[in-house]
Amino acid sequence: MAKYRKLGRTSDQRKALLRNQVTALIQHGRIVTTEAKAKEVRKIADGLIALAVKEKDNYETVKVTAKVPRKDKDGRRVKQIVDKDTKKVLSETHRDKDGKILRIENGVTVTVYDEVEKEIKKDLPSRVHARRQMLKVLYPVVDVPKDAAGRKKNTKNVDLVAKLFDEYGPKYAGRKGGYTRIIKVGQRKGDAAMEVILELV
């Protein structure tokens, strides 16, 4: 006897479906699906959250020096014109008073960078392994703003692994399993399948 539900799909379709639903559950906190699918998704989601709880504090804080582009008052990068050969600064700005781009002979436009000290979290080996296990299940998610839907501007990649470690790990630290609940909604029109809400507790 199989220890999992086949859900009337081939193995590659079933894995893709479950990965998709687990990703949606971690991102939004709740999904509406059928009871059979919810029971399978619950197993995977509970495993990921248990992994996040176990590895949430398994990192060390390291100070690093990073190069950060200098910004002007409008939030745009500051650019200079430097000599191609000697690297000597020819102009502190790459635009004239009217806002037109300057052209200087033998000059190249470069961005000005400042060195900044930052504190970063460096994962220890077991947390790196946990991160890779999570990435095997979760799909990459891109957040598109509703007001400009379909446009690339202001879209951003959502880091679900960081959400698991930073948000769900501390939240469920005192809990020994049972991170999800299933609430029955009723039978679905059409095929009369039992519809449920699967949500994080």
Image: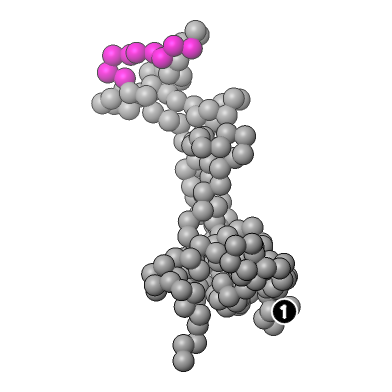
Residue 118, x across and y down, in percent: 56, 51
Q: Is residue 164 above or below residue 149?
A: below
Write down the quadrant of residue 183 in the picture.
Answer: bottom right
Q: Which residues are magenta?
A: 99-107
Q: Which residue is mark 1?
A: 175
161 is higher (above) or lower (below) than 78 = below
Residue nearer the viewer, 127 or 94: 127
Q: What is the quadrant of residue 55 in the picture?
A: bottom right
Q: Residue at x 26, y 26 (%)?
A: 85
Q: Is residue 142 visible?
A: yes
Count neighbours of disc 1 (C-alpha within 10 A) and say few if under 14, some if 14 to 19, many if 20 or more: few
Q: Position of residue 196 (x, y in %)?
A: 67, 68
Q: Residue at x 73, y 78 (%)?
A: 174
Location of residue 103 with respect to 130 vertically, above or below: above
Q: Can you see residue 31? A: no
Residue at 44%, 11% (x, y): give it.
100
* Left or right: 76 in relation to 184: left
In this rendering, the answer to whether 189 lies above or below 173 is: above
Question: 90 left or right of 33?
Answer: left
Quarter of the figure with the C terminus:
bottom right
Residue kind at label 1, given as amino acid type: Arg
Say whether residue 166 is magenta: no
